[in-house]
Amino acid sequence: MEDDSYKNSLKDKIKLLPSEPGVYQYFDKAGVIIYIGKAKNLKKRVSSYFNKTHDNLKTEILVRKITSIEHIVVETEQDALLLENNLIKKYKPKYNILLKDDKSYPWICISNESFPRVFLTRNVVKDGSIYFGPYTSTTMVRALIDLIHRIFKLRNCKLKLTKENIDSGKFNVCLEYHIQNCYGPCVGNYSEELYRNDISKVKHILNGNLSEVLEYLKNMMMKLSEEMRFEEANEYKIKFDLLNNYKSKSTIVSSKIKDVDIFTVDEDEKSGYVNFIKVKNGAIIQSYTVEYKKKLDEPLSEILEKGIVDIRQKFFSVSREILVPFALDIQFDEVKIIIPQIGDKKKLLELSSRNAKYFKLEKKKARSLKNPELKVDRLMEKMMKDLNLKVYPRHIECFDNSNIQGHYPVAACVVFKNGKPSKKDYRHFNIKTVEGPNDFASMEEIVHRRYSRLVKENLPLPDVIVIDGGKGQLGAAVKILRELNILHKICVIGLAKRLEEIFFPGDPIPLYLDKKSETLKVIQHLRDEAHRFGITFHRNQRSKGFLNSELDEITGIGPKTKSTLLTNFKSVQAIKDASLDALQTVVGKSKGTIVYDFFKQ
């Protein structure tokens, strides 16, 4: 009954909503705001939540929790956008996408003083000073301030340089003056008029208008040269070169593009990523990407709209032109929203899109480093894509043969799970049916022995089999897997060591992966592990064979006696060096004498 009363109350409230632009707020039983939205038409937008079945489960849950609705009518849709953005930041409703990164960004301040200072700050104070930014890189801000001070030799002290204080001789020059980093306005060596002229040039630089400042520096350089004032002309040349070098490192787009904001968006299952690029006077002067946490599986258009409003507020942008990748349902007073199709503006949009994508990938990598499972999933996804697999290669097995001219032939099978060695699952094999050095036949034997057993015992098969070798060894493995009727269940590849070529069955053209590829590194690790494991086993078998062969030649000594001798003396060499008494003490008088006589002959 209580739910019905809520529903009836909401229906009555919706009927009374105006068909005007505004912001609506949804409340739950506890009177907490759980969602805030904006609308061109409040009545139409709010009604849509209650007049249809929602595909998204979270939206369905949201609607069930709404017990009260409030709204604010505004003049324009732009006012609704701004109000919605501010209310979301204030109340942080549960079902609204949230801005994750809200740190304080650096600004460049030109102070409101007689001889203004230029410095980095994170606090914007409304004291008449002029602020440029915010910037996303403190390093870039410091480099820019350093460039400005090297060109214009502005003061960095905090002295109160009023005309009265300077005329009264209150101050003395400091070290900055003596090392020629400052003109010394504190003692009247540089007039306020000249200083203000320098500050106006600084403003041009910070606004991205470098051409005018470069032209001024060049003209002064030429003028002083004509007047034979070469030392002063050289100072202007140094300034010109510094600024010109800075300009060459800036991303110049087009001199025709004066003041434009570019916005693009990307997403993954949990977040949306909005990139912002600021172009002024033909140069990119800012780039910034922000992550929004999804709450209701919001569409890209909604994420981008919220990003545009939020970022333009954050950066105090008043650009009259905005470039976006697709049509949006928002408008700003005296601002054109354009979807460029060709030319420099289209290239800017593509650049912004790449930045959003790279930011998304960086976030994903950062999360995977914190969460090992995410890191494994990312690796599995990468390997699946590189090897054109249908499933994640969580279980991989790799085979390698070892023998010396056919003697003591052995093979190794190493197992990787989720990209890491699973040593408890390693297996080694003595080759039983092959005479002489025949790698292909040896590969057939071990592949048959390994997988006929797995099939017989109904044990899980690997997702991928890696064969250490080229087409021949790969063909031998494929033959057996086909006979066992499991080839269609497993991806099998061969790795030829010389050029790290990856061969697939039936494809004569090998796959070459980038040398830095994670997929190739895992496959190489598999191959190296199989080789190491196989060589170690082969060496042990060979050593046993060598030891046993010498003791086997002694007539009258059985396996038990040989074992007793090796257990006590540890090696054949120690048995050879042992005295008759020592041998007779371990294996008795008769057998001790036989062993002693054999090695002393």
Image (tube, grey):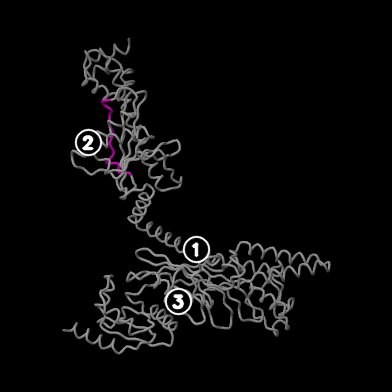
Q: State if disc 1 and disc 2 touch (CB < 8 Å).
A: no
Task: Answer yes or no: is residue 439 visible.
Answer: yes
Q: Quadrant of residue 64?
A: bottom left
Distance from disc 3 to disc 2, alpha carbons, whole Å, reads 64 Å
Mark 3 Cα shell of 10 Å, populated few (<14), some (14-19), many (≥20): many
Left or right: 495 with respect to 243? Answer: left
Give the label on residue 350, or none: 1
- Name the residue carrying label 3: 309
Q: Quadrant of residue 52?
A: bottom left
Q: Amino acid at mark 1?
A: Glu
Q: Is residue 422 magenta?
A: yes
Could you say where residue 532 lies in the image, as x and y percent from the top left?
36, 35
Could you say where residue 161 lies in the image, as x and y percent from the top left?
67, 80
The single residue placed furthest to the left in the displayed view is 1
Residues in magenta? 421-433
> Which quadrant is home to the N terminus?
bottom left
Above or below: residue 262 compared with residue 542: below
**In front: 30, or 577?**
30
SS state under label 3: helix
**In front: 126, or 91?**
91
Q: Is residue 70 magenta?
A: no
Distance from disc 2 to disc 1, alpha carbons, whole Å, reads 54 Å
